[in-house]
Amino acid sequence: MEYNFTDIEQRWRKRWADEKIYHVDIDGEKPKFYVLNMFPYPSGAGLHVGHPLGYIASDIYARYKRLCGYNVLNPMGYDAYGLPAEQYAIQTGQHPAITTEQNIARYREQLDKIGFSFDWDREVRTCDPKYYKWTQWAFLRMYNSFYCNRCASAQPISALVDHLSTKGTEGLDVAQTEELHFSAANWNAMSEQEKQQTLMNYRLAYLGETMVNWCAELGTVLANDEVVDGVSVRGGYPVVQKKMKQWCLRVSAYAQRLLDGLNGIDWSESIKETQRNWIGRSEGTEMVFHTNSADQPEITIFTTRADTIFGVTFMVLAPESEYVKPLTTDAQRVAVEQYVADTKKRTERERIADRRVSGVFTGSYAQNPFTGEQIPIWVSDYVLSGYGTGAIMAVPAHDSRDYAFARHFNLPIRPLVEGCDVSEESFDAKEGIVCNSPATGVESLKGFTLNGLTIKEAIVATKQFVTDNRLGRVKTNYRLRDAIFSRQRYWGEPFPIYYKDGMPQPIPEECLPIELPEVTKFLPTESGEPPLGNATKWAWDTKSLQVVDNSLIDNQTIFPLELSTMPGFAGSSAYYLRYMDAHNDTALVSEKADQYWRNVDLYVGGSEHATGHLIYSRFWNKFLHDIGVSCEEEPFGKLVNQGMIQGRSNFVYRIKGTQQFVSLGLKDNYDVTPIHVDVNIVENDVLDINAFRQWRPEYENAEFILEDGKYICGWAVEKMSKSMFNVVNPDLIVERYGADTLRIYEMFLGPINQSKPWDSNGIDGSARFLRKFWNLFFDNDTIAVDDSTPTPENLKSLHKLIKKISEDIEDFSFNTSVPAFMIATTELASQKCHSRQILEPTVILLAPFAPHIAEELWNRMGHDATVFDEKWPVFDEKYLVESTVKMAVSFNGKTRYTIDVSASASNDEVQQQALGDANAAKYLEGHQIVKVIVVPKRIVNIVIK
RNA sequence: GCCCAGAUGGCGGAAUCGGUAGACGCGCUGGUCUCAAACACCAGUGGGGCAACCCGUGCCGGUUCGACCCCGGCUCUGGGUACCA
């Protein structure tokens, strides 16, 4: 019987869809299991063979869990807002909604061919108003919340207003932009506008004047994770620092919880470490340095090395620091202003590329709080305004950056560790015994000294002294910044915000969603406003509670709406919750659905989201947890990162200045240029010469120098992309080999979490395996499954397979499952096994990997129902018990021969047998036995001398 | 610079507990079938040697009866991150 995969796959896909066998509902009888893939951005290029890798792995797991009796939720949707659709719209005028719709249709068509067990009834699209209603809703909830440090939870803003109106800021311990101090009387005396302004300091979603990454070419601000090396991730355009009023999310409030939460989740250590570094907790000390004149502010600095206080020889302010202006003396004003202006002009990229030492003296001095010594205050761009307090105490002997600065400007360097050499470089290590702290003859405050302590002891002692003497305080800093939440783009979620007297006002929740307005142009307006500035119907009527025409704006009852839209991560931050209850019009997710599905048990996606989506999503979920929407504190229990599938490019070698192409093995005899050639006209690295001549007009008259009558192409592993001509489309593989072969082959390629090149050369092996598997069940054209009693060999082959496959799936080692199937198939074929008791469980084992063929065989064996309603076979050790075992015998660790021993033999008996063997005499000749080590069922090692 | 991961035949990769290194697949070689080719099937395939054997998991050293695996020191590759005080 021929294995006709095209017919089989089409038939089963239709039946699965018609009977909705992958549709799931809450089922109190069964335990739940939630499998999730990071949903794709539907790009215009469609899927290539790399995209389905993670989907196939998670589908195998989902089908396996279903067979194990779980109620499995395995949804799919689209992250549909994004820059490429908008840029395409700018170029062509085509509305992004239309191209997005087309791309989604194409994705769906491609996904459907691979046989996934998705419950499409739960599909979400981030650009659907029914979906982004809940994105806007969550934003409003954040706007109306603040973060209480004492209860480590988000609280309604009304609770804060109560506190402020009765106690002012007294006893307040909350997350805030800057620490404010005022009394209840002050608060009550504020105008409504002032109160609103003040509350912005505390809201979890707030409008803040912050330094942002501004990308002029894209016309928008970008989040920190969207900028790499000073250029935008998308497009690679330069990014500059600019102060702008932007919506922000107070992610920093959750820094500690985001850090703590990592300990309880099953993610790869590398991703957790990346997040820990990104959060960047550092424990240190804030110290106050007094300046000399009453009209100059005192300077607060942050340091993790308080122990180096006696080595401070200068201070440095960030150019953007608010301390700069009041601390600049008249004599230095021109130089300082010039320096600050110069710094502003340089992009971050330039600052990184050309890391020269620069700076300028302010003319002012501060006093060392421990010795009263006069310390010059400088300004330099190596100090960042955004971290700590934007001011540092410089200890050139023990910080390499301070060292470089001191050397450049000839400032003193004062070593504080016994025996350290600072003549060439600073001594940054936190090891050694402290000296010169204070130096001989220097008077220290209250006789305080660190001399003789280790650095670690000195840090503790200094912190204690600083706290006791009110010179500052112990402080924990986080590198994690608040997320900038505005984008000056069209194709994103609009904010449910309008402006009254310049102050933002929330639109009531019950009016959501506020739908994205139509525009005719997708570019910023001529006055530099975001694209929504082009909308003509984009004003809020506070009476009728609806969006109305701009011409009606009177700033009395009708007001302008926010022109920015939300960033890409907004829609992807809570989509896993929405899948639980995708059609609920009254809640993001019902309590019932949330209580049942709880959180994602298995999340599969790329590691490139480590500092983006995977942080924002955890933050967003923690907020929803605080307000009682999500019952779990962490959204994703187990995370598996699939590797990238790279392209395997092929090359032809043209002899320079000719139309002659030389085969790989002969190319070194000529002066050649390698040229990328379309991998689709190359098979097993052999070029299809005729196809090549037709590929492009310029190769029409190409001539070839062959080896063994063939043209062999060179190859290289590169990113899979159109320009390298190495894109492999899964549709073509499915057409030629079938979806089951594609699935098996993608898993066989290598470990799931490893990046690896796509190599079509090996796919025949996977196709051959499925054909052999299919043939197990047929005798010529008839199904050959009978009710015969299985032999011990049959049972052994089966149970070996059950054990291996079950373990592999649990461990996500699908690449080693495929060989196990191949071996079992070979064994069962040579045993001529036709027993139903063996073949039926074998089909169930294969079903997660190759669902179509499994269904077909299941059906042909006489079952009407789907194989996925069966039970996963139970492994029984007893079938694997051997009567005899092969053991290796080695002498001094070198294996010489093997012996067959009874499985029940004791170690002594095994030793007797190994030494009694005729071979033993040969190897023992002229030697003495020192000892014999017997490892049961494995090896007998005889130590001789 | 710092952090993380890795290095095994011609290639992708196995060896999940420190116990016969190279499973399985690709490729290659030989054979069967065929007028021939493709497909399919069968056999062989780490290197050296006629053989007994010897050598072999990036490099150097250590622990052990025994090391791809553990420890110390390097080299290289991939990824993340970077004036974070």
Image: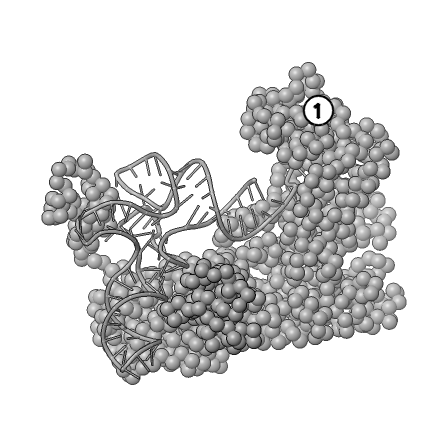
Color theme of the render: one colour
| Location of residue A406 with respect to A618 vertically, above or below | above
Horizontal arrangement in the rendering, residue B40 relative to residue A670 (left or right): left
Residue at 86% across, 68% down = A553
Chain name for mark 1: A
> Residue A366, can we see it?
yes
Q: Which residue is mark 1?
A: A370
Image quadrant in which the C terminus of chain A is located: top left
Residue in the image at 60% along x and 69% along y: A43
In the image, A370 versus A142, the foreground residue is A370
The residue under label 1 is which amino acid type? Phe
Q: Residue B39 is drawn in which quadrant? A: bottom left
Q: Residue furthest top?
A: A441
Which one is in front, A610 or A502?
Answer: A610
Residue B56, position in %: x, y? 32, 47
Could you tell me which residue is drawn at 58 percent across and 63 percent down? A577
What residue is rendered at 77% in x and 73% in y?
A520
Q: Quadrant of residue A101?
A: bottom right
Image quarter of the N terminus of chain A: bottom left
- The answer to whether residue A798 is seen in the rendering is no
